[in-house]
Image (cartoon, grey):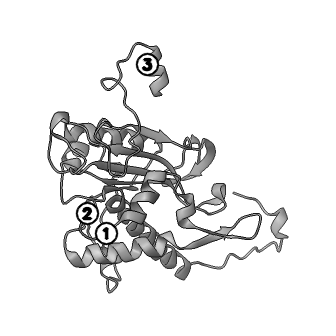
Amino acid sequence: RTNARIQAEGGKYNVDYFDWIEGVPRKNHEHPHGCIRKWFSPINIVYYKDGQEYKGTPPGMYSITYDPVGINKENKEITHKHSHNSIKVWMNPCQYNNFKTALVCAYYGRTEKLEEADRICYLLARYYNCIGTTGVEINRGETISNFTKWKALKYLMKDAVEVWDTTIKGATVSHYGINMSGEAKKLEGLRLLKEMLYTEIGTDEAGNIIRMFHTIYDYQSIVELKKWNNIGNFDRVSEMILRGVQWRNSNIEAAKELATRKKVIDKNNNHILTRDWF
């Protein structure tokens, strides 16, 4: 439900609904809870899986990145110096967006209980059908235990171990969530984030280059990227580093598929435009 609808139904401001946090960092007059901002709804299409026809949002079409806070804290104790939860939903490159990724939804704020923020992430994962593509940083908070309690582990992404160790060739056993502990990983994560942000993904009608950061419609995230330094508290940047990890992991998986592609031979020698699609 939108804030306007909750208000029309008798909801109380800063109790039942909250404003989007505009300050970077959050201003003292802004309620720390924050709200969800949605730019695009999930697509609803007919797709096929294991020979069956489905209608809805195909799994894996969207990914989530989530940087949670570490401890419970009452609203009156939270200042702009404290960490806030940052969650983003991304549409992955596909034929429905001209193979250009885009930010479709975001949440930034701090709930009093860790479980409340985890539930926001869980509901977004269900709404966008992010099965196996919900990347959450796990060196803090209680997200894994909450998703286990809700029987929702299928939504969580497993750690992208091949991003950190390029020598791994075979299948590996990894845990749920992304572990960003250690300075080496954080530095590599920053490098991956910068590489992703400046990736050329196309051109506009005037022939100007479109880079990945042009598809981040959250103004506050862009401001935070510009303000970033190595001593401040930048929750949105920390969360977007996870997207850099997902980006790199997708490239690794794509390279694997490309290396194992098999040539399709049409025995009937039909023209490509006359062949069956499925």
Q: Which element type, helix, strand or loop, lies under badge 3?
A: helix
The answer to whether one can see residue 151 in this image is no
- Give the quarter of the image for residue 244: bottom left
Q: What type is the residue that disc 2 sits on?
A: Gly
- Marks 2 and 3 in Cβ contact (< 8 Å): no
Q: What type is the residue that disc 3 sits on?
A: Gln
Q: Is residue 79 above or below residue 246?
A: above
> Separation of disc 2 and disc 1 at Cα?
6 Å
Q: Which mark is residue 232?
A: 2
Q: Which mark is residue 229?
A: 1
Front one among 248 and 210: 210
The answer to whether one can see residue 65 in this image is yes
> Separation of disc 2 and disc 3 at Cα?
36 Å
- Give the quarter of the image for residue 75: top left
Q: In this view, does 106 lie above or below 275?
A: above
Q: Which residue lies furthest to the front in this view?
A: 28
Q: Where is residue 88 in the image (x, y as percent from the top left)?
A: 42, 51
Q: What type is the residue that disc 1 sits on?
A: Asn
Q: Where is residue 17 in the image (x, y as percent from the top left)?
A: 37, 27
Q: In this figure, which residue is indicated by the disc labeled 3?
A: 7
- Marks 2 and 1 in Cβ contact (< 8 Å): yes
